Image (cartoon, rainbow, N blue to C red):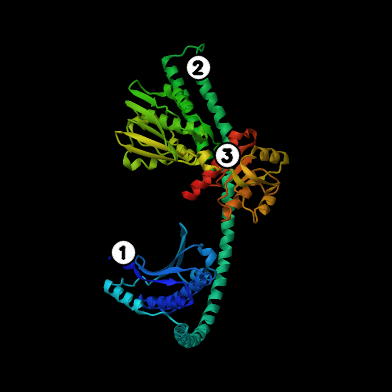
Amino acid sequence: MTTRQRDELIRLPVGAEPDVFTIRRCGREVAVAVGLESQDQIRVATVLSDIGRDLVHAGATATVRFLLKEGPPTLAVEFSWLGAEAGALLTTGRDTAERLLDGVHVTHEAGQTVVTLHKLRSPAARPLTNAELDRLRGILAQRGVSTPMDELRAQNQELLETLESLEAKGKELTRLNEELEETNHGVVALYKELSEELEETNRGVVALYAELNEKSSQLKAASEAKTRFWSNISHELRGPINSVIGLARLLTGPGADPLTEEQRHQVGLVGDAGSTLLSLVNELLDTAKAESGRLVAQPAQVDLTAVCLQLRGALRSTVPSPEVELVIEEPDPAPPVVTDETMLVRILRNLLSNSLKFTESGEVRLRIDADDEDVRFTVSDTGIGIPADQQDRVFEEFHQVHSDLQAASPGTGLGLPYARRLAEILGGGLTLDSEHGRGTTVVLLLPRPDPTRTSPARVDSLLIVDDDADFRDRLARLVHGVAAGVRHAADGREAIEALDGYRPDLIFLDLFMPGMNGKEVLQVLREKPGSRDIPVVVVTSSPPDGLDLTGAGLRAGLLLKSQVTQETLRLAIGEAFAVVARTVTG
């Protein structure tokens, strides 16, 4: 027996009123046979009766199949007919089925409509054997056509059983109410005791919150003081250090008074120490900026071929010896990538310089690969490598792996932490794999948002929020081919009010506005479930310190007002859609 034959119990026609009574009775008997509870038996019979009447009243002739399915155990009833779709024929039956059963599935193909109803059996229900199925088919086949009187008797019996069940439940409910009343006396006493304890605890919580608020204010003040310190110390440190380096170069440069070998050596040490100190200060400042969120990526189309040429020229003089070869592979063709070029060059130069510093022979290689989703920058070397127990710690600030080459090539221990923070700001990541004595491979993975794929060619609605009416009009003209409809808001509060009952497909949001500024509006949008996934392009003349538009922050694209063109507009929209898509799928 095939699976299809085993599943089917019986099939019946439905074309007249007596047929409705027959399928109702048959459904009830099948429900009893497969172990459905009494209430579920009535639900199945009621749904079959309503759908059957809808079909008869519409003048349709249908076939009804009763089936048993496993995994999970299910009683299925399938109505099929030729002609009109289910929506035109089923007036009350479909609503009844969706309320009382576990599933309703409708298909309409080649003029045939199939409505399949599902009622789950108990998960513990055992499958019926072939013998049991055959016996059930025989019982069903022997049933004659039901009459209204037969159906009335059956419904009266169901009603009596339901009344008896309700009476029993009423008695049980009365007993439970009496027990509940007794319990309530104890609960009231316990509630009073707990209320007193809770009130005492609340007084302690209020005091704790006050203390936490004070500590939070102190931490905020300390963070602001730290930011001011880094801002002020930048010029204060760099000026004297540059003077030291410049004076050392003057002492050893052309036209300077002759120096003894010892003096030249000492001046050289002063110059090297000054250069090291300047590098340390620069890395400290950049690391602090990245940590505080003051570094903001400004994505644009990047020419990777030009990036490779720039790296090759900048690093050629840093190759430590003829035994080390610097290989920078230019991708052919160079894949398009949208990112912050300055940050990308800093990361790659940092990684390549690190590899050159710790490679005595062999090669340091940069390879660029891309697929539809990401661009992979792989920096590999044949250097001294990193022990397995140190590979996680190299991303800690100031941590350095001790070795002979490390002693000969001192550093700050900030390069890799700084590179990883920049990678995160760009929406990517940095991973390291190394084998002690064999070499190291570092991979920078950046997302590759394709504006033609991540941003739609056209959206239905767009909202422009800016207090400058002239700029709103200018931007509206530029997005004419992007949006079917454009709405305007002159400030942040007007934008929030406009979004009450209105959900645009894209928002252009000015950052600096009187009253409620763009950052506050964006924070409100990202906190609400209904608007947290709306793509937003932040429009500003200059991004402020601490603005985090990445997937971990406010999730938006960036468009500088001084650089508004069709190309930058397209890139900003693509980044806005891409950063929201990465957050949702990630």
What residue sits right under mark 3 in the picture?
572
Mark 3 touches mark 2? (CB < 8 Å): no
Q: Examine the image and state in which quarter residue 513 appears.
A: top right
What residue sits right under mark 1 in the picture?
3
- Cα distance in 3D space between marks 3 and 1: 56 Å
What residue sits right under mark 2 in the picture?
251
Residue type beneath disc 2: Leu
Q: Where residue 314 appears, x then y in whole percent? A: 46, 24
Residue type beneath disc 3: Ala
Instruction: From the viewer's side, name the closer residue of 258 and 56.
Output: 56
Q: Is residue 108 left or right of residue 294?
A: left
Mark 3 touches mark 1? (CB < 8 Å): no
Q: Is residue 485 above or below residue 344?
A: below
Quarter in which the N terminus is drawn? bottom left
Q: Earlier in the sequence, mark 1 or mark 2?
A: 1
Disc 3 element: helix
Q: Where residue 566 appears, x then y in whole percent? A: 61, 34
Residue type beneath disc 1: Thr
Label 3 or label 2, whichever lies nearer to me, is 3
Instruction: From the viewer's side, name the closer residue of 36 and 534.
Output: 36
Disc 1 element: helix
Mark 1 crowd level (few <14, some 14–19, many ≥20, 10 Å Cα):
few
Q: Is residue 241 above or below residue 478?
A: above
- Cα distance in 3D space between marks 1 and 2: 96 Å
In the image, which disc is placed on residue 14? none
Q: Earlier in the sequence, mark 3 or mark 1?
A: 1
Q: Is residue 414 above or below residue 98?
A: above
Disc 2 element: helix
Residue under the image location 47 percent in, 72 percent down: 15
* Residue 546 in view: no
Mark 2 crowd level (few <14, some 14–19, many ≥20, 10 Å Cα):
some
Mark 3 crowd level (few <14, some 14–19, many ≥20, 10 Å Cα):
many
